[in-house]
Image: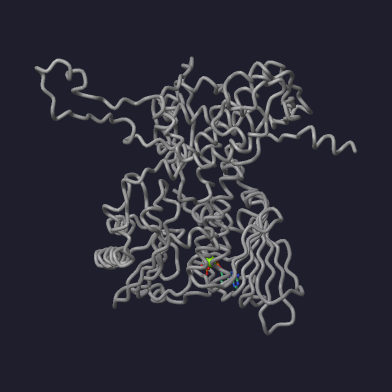
């Protein structure tokens, strides 16, 4: 029988390799940024368009390539970084597999421009799906620019599999963070769809963290420093009180390479033992330096997992270093677990506080003394007032609101009371008009009220959802047929985190599997056709939530659902709908701002109007 085994042609082999190296635009970003760092760049610019689906470009001022190297760099297993197998155990570079450029060029349109410092003229190479389209000379500055366009143009299945731009951009930003955090001695800029998203100048590590995660981060950081023969640790952990419900800000770098390690993560978690509220995760930004000979980076194609020779020692050292820092900075004793978290997070229901009625026992109780019997056992019942406590964090703001409103009086209102006064004003609104399907205009005693319908409705829905989630009395509508929705593993994790809260809004999940959920009930206010959009939106909101100490899943969920379901600008409203909107808005706890803190209405007094007619 004839021989049947053949060697795969290069372009096929490259496409197969690309499947491992390039999962999504963010993978290209990672490879290109790492190459720029290996080239000794001091300034690196990342440009993306449409979350990398249209363009990913990295421009560096590194050492560049000769004409021959430029051409060779796209060959598989072409690398300048190792020469012998022994070098694998002395790695000081990010790359070494020589696969990235070949893989990327197999599945995209690539334009490489590069010039070495000593040369007058550089090279430009254009490659499309592994085919060299052109190679020429070009006048360019020192360094390298690689533009990757139309990723997966020849693998439609992969291209279609990409997530929304929001999600893909989130992944790109994550990679950008990881590289930028590992190299605070290099300046990085990122441009997204033509506008500057980040501009990180050379700085120390602490400043780099703060530049990325915001000024508020500074006060949350506790330095960790440890210097032993086998391991040097430097960096920061977040103070326990700022621990998050999500694992967003957890960064390990080993010899300046971002890595994931559940084992080392556990070491940190155990150092925080007893200091964290249930279900929260500490932030950390830790750099570990070990002898390259004691690690094996080769076990994972994207090189985010590595193998340590002596994991147990690292675990112990890491744990004790973090513990030591937390102790030294006096973190443990100042922690106050009894602090009412409602004070931090308005609307966040603290279950343990309000659900346990306390029992006061009258010690002088005598069952034979008739007249005292009735007050023998007093339950501190949850009164309606205690429900108001859920909103306690708003008190200071609330006062301000009332002041703001003291000048707002509805027309024909007899007294000078505020519009919060009672329901009376509801009947007193004379007329509402809808302006440009966007604003609701109404008359009030002092003049005129203009309400932004979309923002106002967001506020109304937001408070409504929060109420349902806190008192847990949401009503569901049963679906005729169960709804099966598919998500990525990561997205399912987010759904799992929010499942309980989602159920309190009225969702009923019959099952949550590894990559899908089945829903048999949805909140009354949610049309079945909107369910998947709402959940998608919610997931991307969670992923994109600006890191904030007061992150609250409940709050975010309410905001996200309110945003998805609120009446949109451009929607025409009937008279009674307009009135209902106005009434519901002013029945809100905080009617004057949308959940994202934008004004829901403005007023204009007759005086102000008069002035305009002078
Ligand atoms: P690896 O990084 O594993 O060596 P790559 O496919 O990423 O493999 O790159 C191949 C080679 O191309 C590198 O070894 C390097 O010599 C060269 N190269 C890639 N990007 C750059 C760059 N930005 N500046 C200079 N040389 C580069
Ligand atoms: Mg590389």
Residue 176 versus residue 268: which sits nearer the camera? Answer: 268
Tally of numbered tags: 0
* Residue at 52% in and 58% down: 213
Residue furthest toward the left? 368
Who is closer to the viewer here, 420 or 459? 420
Does residue 131 appear in this view?
Answer: no
Q: Where is residue 478 in the image (x, y as percent from the top left)?
A: 46, 16
> Where, quadrant-wise, is the C terminus in this rendering?
top right
Query: Height in image: 16 above or below 583?
Result: below
The structure's colour scheme is one colour
Left or right: residue 170 versus residue 240 is: right
Examine the rendering and report whether any part of residue 425 can be seen.
yes
**Residue 260 on image: x %, y %:** 39, 57
Q: From what the image shows, is residue 93 above or below residue 519?
A: below
Q: Where is residue 593 in the image (x, y as percent from the top left)?
A: 61, 37
Q: Residue at x 65, y 77 (%)?
A: 66
Name of the residue lying farthest toward the right: 614
To which quarter of the image does residue 286 belong?
bottom left
Is residue 277 found left or right of 66 in the rendered image? Answer: left
From the top left corner, tell me how far across and down residue 93 is, in percent: 48, 72
Say which quarter of the image contains residue 200. bottom right
Tell me the quarter of the picture where residue 511 sits: top left
In percent of the image, x 65 and y 64: which residue is there? 146
């Amino acid at each position: 029988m004839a021989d049947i085994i053949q060697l795969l042609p290069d372009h096929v082999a490259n496409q197969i390799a690309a499947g491992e190296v390039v999962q999504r635009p963010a993978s290209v970003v990672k490879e290109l940024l790492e190459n720029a760092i290996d080239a000794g760049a001091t300034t690196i610019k990342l440009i993306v368009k449409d979350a990398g689906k249209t363009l990913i470009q990295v421009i560096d001022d590194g050492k560049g390539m000769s004409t021959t190297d430029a051409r060779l760099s796209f060959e598989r297993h072409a690398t300048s970084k190792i020469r012998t197998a022994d070098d694998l155990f002395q790695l000081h570079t990010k790359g070494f597999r020589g696969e990235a450029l070949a893989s990327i060029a197999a599945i995209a349109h690539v334009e490489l421009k590069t010039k070495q410092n000593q040369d007058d003229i550089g090279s430009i190479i254009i490659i499309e799906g592994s085919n060299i389209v052109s190679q020429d000379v070009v006048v360019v500055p020192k360094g390298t620019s690689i533009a990757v366009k139309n990723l997966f143009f020849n693998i439609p299945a992969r291209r279609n599999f990409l997530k929304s731009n929001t999600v893909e951009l989130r992944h790109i930003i994550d990679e950008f963070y990881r590289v930028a955090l590992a190299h605070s001695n290099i300046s990085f800029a990122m441009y997204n769809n033509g506008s500057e998203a980040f501009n990180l100048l050379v700085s120390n590590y602490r400043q780099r963290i703060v530049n990325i995660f915001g000024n508020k981060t500074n006060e949350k950081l506790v330095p960790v420093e440890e210097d032993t023969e086998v391991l040097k640790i430097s960096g920061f952990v977040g103070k326990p009180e700022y621990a998050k419900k999500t694992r967003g800000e957890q960064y390990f770098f080993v010899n300046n390479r971002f890595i994931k390690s559940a084992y080392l993560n556990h070491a940190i978690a155990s150092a925080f033992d007893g200091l964290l509220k249930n279900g929260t995760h500490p932030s950390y930004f830790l750099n570990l330096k070990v002898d390259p000979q004691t690690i094996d980076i080769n076990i994972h194609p994207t090189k985010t997992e590595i193998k340590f020779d002596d994991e147990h020692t690292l675990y112990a050292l890491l744990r004790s270093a973090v513990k030591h820092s937390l102790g030294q900075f006096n973190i443990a004793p100042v922690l106050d677990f009894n602090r009412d978290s409602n004070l931090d997070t308005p609307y966040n229901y603290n279950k343990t506080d309000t659900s346990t009625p306390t029992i006061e026992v009258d010690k002088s109780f005598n069952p034979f003394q008739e007249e005292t019997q009735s007050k023998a056992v007093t339950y501190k019942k949850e009164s309606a007032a205690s429900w108001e406590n859920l909103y306690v964090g708003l008190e200071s703001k609330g006062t301000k609101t009332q002041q703001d409103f003291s000048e707002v009086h509805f027309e024909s209102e007899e007294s000078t009371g505020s519009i919060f006064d009672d329901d009376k004003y509801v009947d007193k609104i004379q007329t509402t008009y809808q302006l440009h399907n966007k604003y609701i205009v109404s008359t009030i005693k002092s003049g005129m009220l203009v309400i932004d319908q979309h923002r106002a409705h967001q506020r109304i829905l937001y408070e409504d959802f929060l109420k349902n989630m806190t008192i847990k009395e949401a009503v569901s509508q049963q679906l005729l047929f169960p709804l099966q929705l598919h998500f990525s593993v990561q997205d399912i994790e987010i759904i799992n985190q929010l499942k309980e809260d989602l159920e309190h809004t009225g969702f009923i999940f019959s099952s949550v599997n590894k990559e899908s959920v089945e829903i048999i009930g949805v909140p009354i206010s949610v049309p079945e056709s909107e369910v998947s959009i709402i959940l998608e939106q919610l997931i991307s909101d969670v992923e994109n939530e600006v890191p904030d100490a007061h992150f609250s899943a409940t709050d975010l969920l309410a905001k996200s659902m309110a945003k998805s379901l609120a009446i949109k600008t451009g929607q025409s409203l009937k008279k009674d709908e307009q009135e209902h909107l106005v009434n519901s808005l002013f029945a809100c706890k905080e009617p004057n701002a949308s959940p994202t803190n934008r004004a829901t209405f403005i007023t204009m007094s007759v005086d102000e109007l008069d002035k305009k007619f002078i």
